[in-house]
Image (cartoon, rainbow, N blue to C red):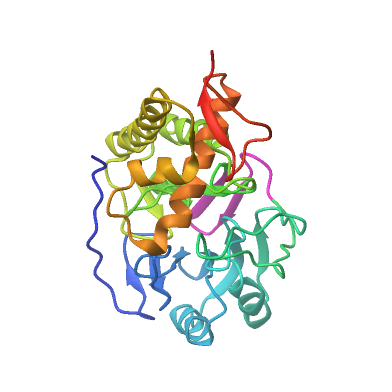
Amino acid sequence: MIPFVRQIDFRYGEPDQVSPLIRRVIADNPGPFTFKGTGTYIVGRGEVAVIDPGPMDADHLEALLKATQGERVAVILVTHDHADHAPLADGLAKATGARIIGCEPHPDRQAPPQGVEEGLDRVYRPDRTPADGELIAGPGWTLRTLPTPGHTANHLCFALEEENALFTGDHVMGWSTTVVIPPDGDMTDYYASLERVKAGGFATLWPTHGPPITDPGPFLDAYLAHRRRREAQILGVLGRGPAMIDSLVGEMYVGLDKRLQRAAAASVLAHLLHLVKTGQVVSDGHPGLESEFHLAE
Protein backbone atom coordinates (compact mmCIF):
# COMPACT_ATOMS: atom_id res chain seq x y z
CA MET A 1 0.00 0.00 0.00
CA ILE A 2 1.35 3.43 -0.97
CA PRO A 3 1.47 5.64 2.16
CA PHE A 4 -0.49 8.56 0.69
CA VAL A 5 -1.00 11.63 2.86
CA ARG A 6 -4.39 12.84 1.73
CA GLN A 7 -5.03 15.77 4.07
CA ILE A 8 -3.91 19.23 3.04
CA ASP A 9 -4.92 22.41 4.88
CA PHE A 10 -5.23 25.55 2.75
CA ARG A 11 -7.52 28.26 1.42
CA TYR A 12 -7.69 28.89 -2.32
CA GLY A 13 -5.68 31.91 -3.35
CA GLU A 14 -4.00 32.32 0.06
CA PRO A 15 -0.21 31.89 0.29
CA ASP A 16 0.98 29.42 2.90
CA GLN A 17 4.54 29.50 4.24
CA VAL A 18 5.21 25.76 4.07
CA SER A 19 8.97 25.86 4.75
CA PRO A 20 11.56 28.57 5.47
CA LEU A 21 12.06 29.24 1.74
CA ILE A 22 8.80 28.01 0.20
CA ARG A 23 5.31 29.47 -0.08
CA ARG A 24 2.46 27.64 -1.80
CA VAL A 25 -0.67 29.06 -3.44
CA ILE A 26 -3.28 26.54 -4.63
CA ALA A 27 -5.43 27.27 -7.67
CA ASP A 28 -9.15 26.62 -7.51
CA ASN A 29 -9.12 23.86 -10.15
CA PRO A 30 -9.91 20.64 -8.26
CA GLY A 31 -10.67 17.52 -10.27
CA PRO A 32 -10.00 13.81 -10.77
CA PHE A 33 -6.47 14.52 -12.07
CA THR A 34 -5.63 17.64 -10.02
CA PHE A 35 -6.82 16.59 -6.53
CA LYS A 36 -7.53 19.85 -4.62
CA GLY A 37 -5.93 21.95 -7.39
CA THR A 38 -2.59 23.06 -8.82
CA GLY A 39 -0.12 24.03 -6.12
CA THR A 40 2.09 26.90 -7.32
CA TYR A 41 5.31 27.33 -5.35
CA ILE A 42 7.07 30.61 -4.62
CA VAL A 43 10.72 30.14 -3.64
CA GLY A 44 12.71 32.79 -1.76
CA ARG A 45 12.04 36.28 -0.48
CA GLY A 46 12.56 39.62 -2.18
CA GLU A 47 13.67 38.06 -5.45
CA VAL A 48 11.75 34.86 -6.08
CA ALA A 49 11.15 31.94 -8.41
CA VAL A 50 7.64 30.72 -9.21
CA ILE A 51 7.23 27.02 -10.03
CA ASP A 52 4.27 25.72 -12.08
CA PRO A 53 2.17 28.91 -12.30
CA GLY A 54 -0.93 26.87 -13.13
CA PRO A 55 -4.00 26.98 -15.35
CA MET A 56 -5.35 29.98 -17.25
CA ASP A 57 -7.18 31.50 -14.32
CA ALA A 58 -7.42 35.24 -13.67
CA ASP A 59 -8.10 34.75 -9.96
CA HIS A 60 -5.01 32.58 -9.55
CA LEU A 61 -2.88 35.13 -11.42
CA GLU A 62 -4.17 37.85 -9.11
CA ALA A 63 -3.41 35.65 -6.08
CA LEU A 64 0.19 35.12 -7.24
CA LEU A 65 0.69 38.82 -7.88
CA LYS A 66 -0.72 39.63 -4.44
CA ALA A 67 1.47 36.98 -2.78
CA THR A 68 4.61 38.49 -4.38
CA GLN A 69 3.65 42.14 -3.99
CA GLY A 70 6.74 44.23 -3.29
CA GLU A 71 9.02 41.45 -4.53
CA ARG A 72 10.65 40.74 -7.88
CA VAL A 73 9.59 37.58 -9.68
CA ALA A 74 12.89 36.75 -11.38
CA VAL A 75 12.02 33.46 -13.02
CA ILE A 76 9.03 31.24 -13.76
CA LEU A 77 9.83 27.52 -13.88
CA VAL A 78 7.58 24.97 -15.59
CA THR A 79 7.87 21.23 -14.94
CA HIS A 80 5.79 20.20 -17.97
CA ASP A 81 3.28 21.69 -20.36
CA HIS A 82 0.00 20.14 -19.26
CA ALA A 83 -2.88 22.59 -19.10
CA ASP A 84 -3.02 22.65 -15.30
CA HIS A 85 0.66 23.62 -14.97
CA ALA A 86 1.88 25.90 -17.77
CA PRO A 87 -0.78 28.25 -19.26
CA LEU A 88 -0.45 31.02 -16.66
CA ALA A 89 3.31 31.33 -17.29
CA ASP A 90 2.84 33.82 -20.12
CA GLY A 91 0.45 36.08 -18.21
CA LEU A 92 2.62 36.04 -15.10
CA ALA A 93 5.71 36.81 -17.19
CA LYS A 94 3.98 39.78 -18.85
CA ALA A 95 2.81 41.10 -15.48
CA THR A 96 6.21 40.78 -13.78
CA GLY A 97 8.87 40.81 -16.51
CA ALA A 98 10.12 37.40 -15.37
CA ARG A 99 11.83 34.92 -17.67
CA ILE A 100 10.14 31.59 -18.34
CA ILE A 101 12.56 28.69 -17.95
CA GLY A 102 11.04 25.27 -18.29
CA CYS A 103 10.44 22.07 -20.15
CA GLU A 104 10.98 21.94 -23.87
CA PRO A 105 7.72 22.46 -25.79
CA HIS A 106 6.69 19.78 -28.25
CA PRO A 107 4.07 21.28 -30.60
CA ASP A 108 3.71 18.02 -32.54
CA ARG A 109 3.10 15.87 -29.46
CA GLN A 110 -0.11 13.91 -29.25
CA ALA A 111 -2.40 15.29 -26.55
CA PRO A 112 -3.65 12.79 -23.97
CA PRO A 113 -7.11 11.43 -24.80
CA GLN A 114 -10.04 13.43 -23.43
CA GLY A 115 -10.96 12.31 -19.93
CA VAL A 116 -7.45 10.95 -19.27
CA GLU A 117 -5.45 14.07 -18.36
CA GLU A 118 -5.78 17.84 -18.28
CA GLY A 119 -4.64 18.32 -21.89
CA LEU A 120 -1.65 20.15 -23.36
CA ASP A 121 -0.87 23.87 -23.37
CA ARG A 122 -0.14 24.41 -27.07
CA VAL A 123 0.69 28.11 -26.51
CA TYR A 124 3.44 27.53 -23.93
CA ARG A 125 6.87 28.73 -25.07
CA PRO A 126 9.71 29.15 -22.55
CA ASP A 127 12.47 31.70 -23.00
CA ARG A 128 14.78 28.73 -22.75
CA THR A 129 15.00 25.14 -21.57
CA PRO A 130 17.54 24.39 -18.81
CA ALA A 131 20.21 21.72 -19.12
CA ASP A 132 20.42 18.69 -16.86
CA GLY A 133 21.98 19.84 -13.59
CA GLU A 134 21.77 23.54 -14.46
CA LEU A 135 21.62 25.88 -11.46
CA ILE A 136 19.06 28.69 -11.34
CA ALA A 137 19.74 30.93 -8.36
CA GLY A 138 18.59 33.99 -6.48
CA PRO A 139 19.33 35.58 -3.08
CA GLY A 140 19.42 32.71 -0.59
CA TRP A 141 18.06 30.01 -2.94
CA THR A 142 19.48 27.69 -5.56
CA LEU A 143 17.42 25.42 -7.82
CA ARG A 144 18.99 22.55 -9.76
CA THR A 145 17.32 21.07 -12.83
CA LEU A 146 16.59 17.35 -12.83
CA PRO A 147 15.03 15.91 -16.03
CA THR A 148 12.50 13.19 -15.16
CA PRO A 149 10.83 11.88 -18.35
CA GLY A 150 8.05 9.38 -17.89
CA HIS A 151 4.81 11.18 -17.04
CA THR A 152 5.60 13.23 -20.13
CA ALA A 153 8.63 13.04 -22.40
CA ASN A 154 9.70 16.57 -21.41
CA HIS A 155 9.07 16.49 -17.65
CA LEU A 156 11.49 18.32 -15.34
CA CYS A 157 11.90 18.46 -11.56
CA PHE A 158 13.72 21.20 -9.66
CA ALA A 159 15.80 20.60 -6.53
CA LEU A 160 16.07 23.31 -3.86
CA GLU A 161 19.63 22.88 -2.65
CA GLU A 162 19.26 24.85 0.60
CA GLU A 163 16.48 22.56 1.89
CA ASN A 164 17.44 19.32 0.11
CA ALA A 165 13.94 19.35 -1.36
CA LEU A 166 12.60 18.45 -4.80
CA PHE A 167 9.67 20.04 -6.63
CA THR A 168 8.30 16.99 -8.43
CA GLY A 169 5.55 18.38 -10.66
CA ASP A 170 3.48 15.34 -11.63
CA HIS A 171 6.40 12.91 -11.55
CA VAL A 172 5.55 12.05 -7.94
CA MET A 173 2.23 13.17 -6.44
CA GLY A 174 1.18 13.34 -2.81
CA TRP A 175 -2.33 11.95 -3.20
CA SER A 176 -2.25 9.34 -5.98
CA THR A 177 -0.05 7.43 -8.34
CA THR A 178 1.10 9.33 -11.41
CA VAL A 179 -0.66 8.80 -14.73
CA VAL A 180 1.62 7.59 -17.54
CA ILE A 181 -0.13 7.93 -20.91
CA PRO A 182 1.54 6.65 -24.11
CA PRO A 183 2.89 7.76 -26.48
CA ASP A 184 4.08 10.89 -24.64
CA GLY A 185 4.30 9.05 -21.34
CA ASP A 186 6.70 6.12 -21.18
CA MET A 187 6.78 3.57 -18.35
CA THR A 188 10.38 2.51 -19.03
CA ASP A 189 11.50 6.15 -18.72
CA TYR A 190 9.28 6.60 -15.69
CA TYR A 191 10.95 3.73 -13.82
CA ALA A 192 14.38 5.17 -14.57
CA SER A 193 13.33 8.66 -13.42
CA LEU A 194 11.88 7.32 -10.17
CA GLU A 195 15.17 5.59 -9.46
CA ARG A 196 17.02 8.83 -10.17
CA VAL A 197 14.85 10.74 -7.71
CA LYS A 198 15.28 7.99 -5.13
CA ALA A 199 19.07 8.14 -5.56
CA GLY A 200 18.96 11.91 -4.92
CA GLY A 201 18.35 11.35 -1.20
CA PHE A 202 15.97 14.30 -0.87
CA ALA A 203 14.53 15.17 2.54
CA THR A 204 11.20 16.41 1.15
CA LEU A 205 9.28 16.09 -2.10
CA TRP A 206 6.91 18.93 -3.03
CA PRO A 207 4.40 17.72 -5.66
CA THR A 208 2.24 20.13 -7.64
CA HIS A 209 -0.83 18.18 -6.51
CA GLY A 210 -1.22 17.07 -2.92
CA PRO A 211 0.74 17.51 0.30
CA PRO A 212 4.50 17.15 0.72
CA ILE A 213 6.20 13.78 1.08
CA THR A 214 8.43 14.02 4.13
CA ASP A 215 9.82 10.48 4.09
CA PRO A 216 10.64 10.02 0.39
CA GLY A 217 12.57 6.73 0.56
CA PRO A 218 9.73 4.47 1.72
CA PHE A 219 7.22 6.44 -0.33
CA LEU A 220 9.21 5.94 -3.55
CA ASP A 221 9.75 2.27 -2.70
CA ALA A 222 5.98 1.94 -2.39
CA TYR A 223 5.48 3.83 -5.68
CA LEU A 224 7.79 1.38 -7.46
CA ALA A 225 6.27 -1.64 -5.72
CA HIS A 226 2.79 -0.52 -6.80
CA ARG A 227 3.92 -0.44 -10.43
CA ARG A 228 5.55 -3.86 -10.12
CA ARG A 229 2.32 -5.25 -8.65
CA ARG A 230 0.42 -3.91 -11.66
CA GLU A 231 2.90 -5.69 -13.93
CA ALA A 232 2.46 -8.90 -11.95
CA GLN A 233 -1.32 -8.57 -12.30
CA ILE A 234 -0.99 -8.18 -16.07
CA LEU A 235 1.32 -11.17 -16.34
CA GLY A 236 -1.04 -13.20 -14.15
CA VAL A 237 -4.03 -12.47 -16.38
CA LEU A 238 -2.06 -13.15 -19.55
CA GLY A 239 -0.85 -16.39 -18.00
CA ARG A 240 -4.42 -17.65 -18.41
CA GLY A 241 -4.47 -16.71 -22.08
CA PRO A 242 -4.39 -13.75 -24.49
CA ALA A 243 -6.32 -10.64 -23.48
CA MET A 244 -7.17 -7.14 -24.63
CA ILE A 245 -6.81 -4.05 -22.50
CA ASP A 246 -10.51 -3.68 -21.66
CA SER A 247 -10.60 -7.10 -20.04
CA LEU A 248 -7.33 -6.42 -18.20
CA VAL A 249 -8.75 -3.17 -16.78
CA GLY A 250 -11.91 -4.98 -15.68
CA GLU A 251 -9.90 -7.50 -13.67
CA MET A 252 -7.29 -5.11 -12.30
CA TYR A 253 -9.43 -2.10 -11.31
CA VAL A 254 -12.55 -3.51 -9.67
CA GLY A 255 -14.96 -0.73 -8.65
CA LEU A 256 -12.99 2.00 -10.46
CA ASP A 257 -14.60 5.44 -10.82
CA LYS A 258 -15.94 5.58 -14.38
CA ARG A 259 -14.24 8.94 -14.88
CA LEU A 260 -10.88 7.19 -14.50
CA GLN A 261 -11.47 4.15 -16.72
CA ARG A 262 -9.79 5.63 -19.78
CA ALA A 263 -6.82 6.69 -17.67
CA ALA A 264 -6.59 3.15 -16.29
CA ALA A 265 -6.66 1.71 -19.82
CA ALA A 266 -3.85 4.05 -20.88
CA SER A 267 -1.83 3.12 -17.78
CA VAL A 268 -2.23 -0.59 -18.54
CA LEU A 269 -1.06 0.10 -22.09
CA ALA A 270 2.02 1.89 -20.69
CA HIS A 271 2.84 -1.19 -18.60
CA LEU A 272 2.28 -3.48 -21.59
CA LEU A 273 4.59 -1.41 -23.78
CA HIS A 274 7.27 -1.75 -21.10
CA LEU A 275 6.69 -5.50 -20.91
CA VAL A 276 6.93 -5.72 -24.71
CA LYS A 277 10.22 -3.78 -24.61
CA THR A 278 11.61 -6.15 -22.00
CA GLY A 279 10.56 -9.22 -23.98
CA GLN A 280 7.98 -10.55 -21.52
CA VAL A 281 4.87 -9.87 -23.60
CA VAL A 282 4.03 -9.74 -27.32
CA SER A 283 1.07 -8.25 -29.18
CA ASP A 284 -0.81 -9.03 -32.37
CA GLY A 285 0.84 -6.34 -34.47
CA HIS A 286 1.70 -2.84 -33.31
CA PRO A 287 0.80 -2.65 -29.59
CA GLY A 288 -2.10 -0.32 -28.85
CA LEU A 289 -5.39 0.04 -27.00
CA GLU A 290 -7.17 -2.30 -29.45
CA SER A 291 -4.42 -4.95 -29.58
CA GLU A 292 -4.47 -8.43 -28.11
CA PHE A 293 -1.53 -9.30 -25.86
CA HIS A 294 -0.10 -12.59 -24.71
CA LEU A 295 2.95 -13.87 -22.86
CA ALA A 296 6.14 -14.26 -24.87
CA GLU A 297 7.10 -17.87 -25.58
Of 225 and 198, the residue lying toward us: 225
Q: Nearer the viewer, residue 179 or 16?
A: 179
How many numbered tags mark residues here? Answer: 0
Question: Residue 78, position in %: x, y?
Answer: 59, 60
Q: Which quadrant of the structure image shows residue 222?
A: top left
Image coordinates for residue 88, horizontal then vertical, percent? 59, 75
Q: Residue at x 49, y 71 (%)?
A: 46
Please provide percent x and percent y for residue 41: 45, 64
Q: Residue at x 47, y 41 (%)?
A: 268
Residue 74's spot in the image, x, y percent? 61, 67
Judge from the rendering whether residue 67 lies leftward or rightward of residue 157; answer left or right.
Answer: left
Magenta span covers which residues? 130-146
In the image, 77: left or right of 240? right
Kindly identify the residue that appears in the image at 43 percent across and 60 percent down. Answer: 208
Residue 258 against residue 171 in the figure, above or below: below
Left or right for 262, reference 7: right
From the viewer's perspective, is 23 left or right of 276?
left
Residue 182 makes an appearance in the image: yes
Q: Determine whether 217 is above or below 143 in the image.
A: above
Viewer-proximal residue among 12 and 153: 153
